[in-house]
Amino acid sequence: MHIMIIGAAGMIGRKLAKKIAETSELGSQTVDCLSLVDIVEPIAPAGFSGELRQGKADVANVSDAAELIAGRPDVIFHLASVVSGEAEQDFDKGYRINLGGMQNLLEAIRSQATGKPYQPRFVFTSSIAVFGTPMPDVIGDEFHLTPQSSYGTQKAICELLLNDYSRKGFIDGVGIRLPTICIRPGAANKAASSFFSGILREPLAGKPAILPVAESVRHWHASPRTAVRFLIHAATMDTGLLGTWRCLNMPGLSATVSEQIEALERVAGPKAVALIRHEPDPDIRALVGSWPRQFAAGRAQELGFEAEQSFDEIIQVYVDEEMGA
Amino acid sequence: MHIMIIGAAGMIGRKLAKKIAETSELGSQTVDCLSLVDIVEPIAPAGFSGELRQGKADVANVSDAAELIAGRPDVIFHLASVVSGEAEQDFDKGYRINLGGMQNLLEAIRSQATGKPYQPRFVFTSSIAVFGTPMPDVIGDEFHLTPQSSYGTQKAICELLLNDYSRKGFIDGVGIRLPTICIRPGAANKAASSFFSGILREPLAGKPAILPVAESVRHWHASPRTAVRFLIHAATMDTGLLGTWRCLNMPGLSATVSEQIEALERVAGPKAVALIRHEPDPDIRALVGSWPRQFAAGRAQELGFEAEQSFDEIIQVYVDEEMGA
């Protein structure tokens, strides 16, 4: 089987590639070919036994998207996206990449089916940013799409396209609305949610971190390891169980910033906590304030998706995966 | 003030143009210029006191959309659309016109604001086809978008775009989800819902009509006169009351086909009813079966939108407006 990861240079894409390369299997099937694609050259994962293809491509270009799909991958992970803060600042870029990129891929797939049948499993990472205020404290599986950002709007539109192209039989799509991924390794990115990781990651490394919102802010989290598990489950699950609506709220852990900080103190002590500096940022506070705090993700749980149960576990994943040395 | 109706040759567009031309006012403002646009040449309404512009344009062409918006209309009614049955049969055409047309108009408006402020009131006709099964018997104002057709998907995407462009201040948008309009005058069109009008319109004219679904089918209706009233209210209402979600379920009348037929019998007698021939069509039945049957449209009602209370009233509107001679 041929697997393609679009957005393979990103944090989740790298971890997904690494995980697949470790066993050279997806579900119980052997992966003969792994194509890693991003706007920058992706890093090769270790241990892959099949053919590894790596390349640069911009899905916002029709010809790039067509070229990728010409290889007829059996499973496509579409993770490439401009993040929330950047999509809000650069309206054109957000729509061009987040919406235009999706449309180009879907149309390239539909064109591939001319003459010879082609219906790849298409796993798309959506976001809880498809929801916005006013919303209940706990969002159920049937709450309406009400994004309050261009990023959330683009993700919501992509979900609708994924459903329609699946309904028509052009793809076998699954859309997963990821919680905010925490703790993200590496440097802060332009996502407005970046600080949720920063306030743990930086103090764990003995460095100062900025908290731009109040400690009472509640949010919805999952570790990168869990995100990779979600993606692999979405790629291998029986989509016959999904019915006509193929996008799912993923399970996660609902926690306040102060609960995050308490977990940090248990793992790294009060000296780590003291490295967090409160610097309220009205823009970030407004954006984060419009995001969901908790979900009842019953539908995804019934379909076999599982997340962490405590923030101590989430921190432990980071310590295991990123601080091994 | 300059008003533009895109889709002015369609049934609702013609009636809207006629209504505006009668008084040459919208709300309490004088209409100096009325631009009527469609893919075919629109018919000039009688009695308009201002400058009447008529022309052919295809909003699916970027240049056509830009040319329309170059006139900087203060109010734009965007009614142009490929209907449900056609959008389902011709996937490319549906997306090109229903989605691409909306994108072209919104981008043309955004470009117009370069240099000189421009933020027109933009009234968009969405549809109850943005909802699909599984759904409750009565759909509330917060039910999620779950279209089961390409047409419904395109309308749902346009709603998301309308909200985001409004949130960013590029337009002052209002989206209204029209009930099925009944009784449509003239010939049947390619909409799968066409028979809801046909089974009344044809017998009222002494002609046979085909009923492709069971009499127990329940659906959501409003007259063309009410649709025009909705549009004018959407163009003149205080959008500050809408908050961030600018798309509304319109009020309507929930009725079964047998209730429609009973009303027909009261108006035109059993001979008219005898002209209805039952000819089940599995395709139409399946599509209509995935559509909503009733709404609790409290939000729109609070904002001043009002519909008919009985099917007798709906039939009377047709008799008054279309059978005068």
Image: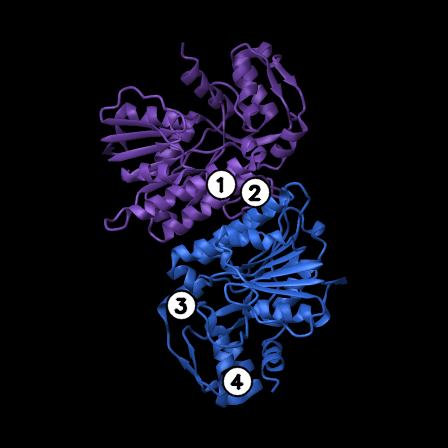
Chain colours: A blue, B purple
* Foreground of the two, A180 or B6: B6
Tag 3 residue: A284
SS for callout 4: helix
Residue type beneath disc 2: Pro
Question: SS class of the residue under badge 1?
Answer: helix
The Cα–Cα distance between marks 4 and 3, rounded to whole angstroms, is: 23 Å
- Looking at the rendered image, the quarter that the N terminus of chain A falls into is bottom right
Image-based side of A1 in relation to B90, left or right: right
Residue under disc 1 on the same chain as residue under disc 3: no
Q: What whole-number distance in Å separates the C-alpha atoms at marks 1 and 3?
A: 31 Å
Tell me the quadrant of the picture where the C terminus of chain A can be found. bottom right
Q: Residues within 10 Å of mark 4 (few under 14, many from 20)?
A: many
Left or right: where B210 falls relative to A154: right
The answer to whether the residue labelled 1 contacts the one labelled 3, judged by CB atoms less than 8 Å apart, is no
Q: On residue A4, which mark appears?
A: none
Which badge, 4 or 3, comes first in the chain's sequence? Answer: 4
Reading the image, the residue beneath label 1 is: B155
From the viewer's side, name the closer residue of B97 and A274.
B97
Give residue B147's mark: 2
Tell me which chain the residue with mark 1 is part of.
B
Q: CA distance from mark 2 to mark 3?
A: 33 Å
**Quick check: do tags 2 and 4 share a chain?**
no
Query: Residue B185 at x, y = what percent?
Result: 47, 20
What residue does disc 4 label?
A: A204
Is residue B141 visible to the viewer in this orientation of the structure?
yes
Q: Earlier in the sequence, mark 2 or mark 1?
A: 2
What separation in Å lies between label 2 and label 4 (alpha carbons)? 46 Å
Could you confirm whether marks 1 and 4 are on the same chain? no
